[in-house]
Amino acid sequence: MTPTHRVDLNCDMGESFGAYTLGHDEAILPFVTSANIACGFHAGDPAVMKRTVRLALRHNVAIGAHPGLPDLVGFGRRNMALSPEEAYDMVVYQIGALAAFVRAEGGQLHHVKAHGALYNMAATSAALAEAIAEAVYRTQPEACLYGLAGSELIQAAQKLGLATANEVFADRSYQPDGTLTPRNQPNALLTDPAEAIAQVVRMVKEGQVRALSGTDVAIRADTVCIHGDGAHALEFAREIRATLHHEGIAVQAGPQHRAAL
């Protein structure tokens, strides 16, 4: 059977640092097609970055920089007041660090995906989105920018002619405007694996997601984020990959789009 749909499975990785180990990177890599590697601000350190890049290359997984806010204590998930210029500077810095490790190992940086609060803030702030897109354009113009489906990040990248991938989430609930339910609100996370997988299949095949309000929201799913730090992350990664195959959905990196200027 020839697949009629395709999607990328991405996972945030390289989030251990120092004496602290987070996630199940090596075990999950066989089930994903792209890895977003922390760059030392919200998590990660030089040794972890190098090790994770090597693991991703070994498994033929596309590598992306995962820049976040400088907030180790809050894991980059707390909003910070920052100017577009500050956002630009910190994203350039982090892309440069990860890209250097990728180049040193003989690879090529495939994409950039902002982390946590920086990602969510830029999803609705045109100024922050433009700063992040500009950082990618000036440092890695051939790279793809991953952003929340239909968000300001996607629009900013398209204006510059960057390749984009509209991202959806397996284990997060949605608001009627297509944004993610904030983590500090009830029902922000989907804890039932069957429910999360059903949401992914519908987003990919039908282009729809059911918001918490009960309304359907149109959505484009080029890449699906699965979180690698949960207690059952490995089982979920294995199950979602198998389900997508059963549904006739091809799983591969690179379902991205570049707008014509």
Image (cartoon, rainbow, N blue to C red):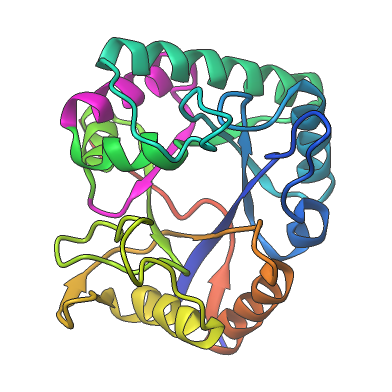
Rendered image quadrant of residue 230: bottom right
Tell how many labels: 0
Residue 185 is left or right of residue 191, and the answer is left
Residue 166 is left or right of residue 124, and the answer is right
Position of residue 260 measured from the top left corner of the image (x, y, whole percent): 23, 36
Asked if residue 214 is positioned above or below residue 107 in the image, the reply reads below
Residue at the spot x=42%, y=23% of the render?
136
Q: Quadrant of the C terminus?
A: top left
Q: Is there any visible trace of residue 4 in the rendered image? A: no
Position of residue 242 measured from the top left corner of the image (x, y, whole percent): 66, 82
Position of residue 47 measured from the top left corner of the image (x, y, whole percent): 82, 25
Q: Quadrant of the N terminus?
A: bottom right
Residue at the spot x=25%, y=36% of the render?
158
In the foreground, 85 or 143? 85
Q: Is there any visible trace of residue 50 in the rendered image? A: yes
Residue at the spot x=48%, y=35% of the render?
76
Rendered image quadrant of residue 24: bottom right
Residue 132 inside the magenta-drawn segment: yes
In the foreground, 39 or 55? 39
Residue bounds of the magenta highlight: 126-150
Rendered image quadrant of residue 9: bottom right
Asked if residue 40 is positioned above or below residue 243 in the image, the reply reads above
Residue 214 is left or right of residue 46, and the answer is left
Position of residue 133 measured from the top left corner of the image (x, y, whole percent): 33, 26
Residue 206 inside the magenta-drawn segment: no
Residue at the spot x=48%, y=69% of the render?
6
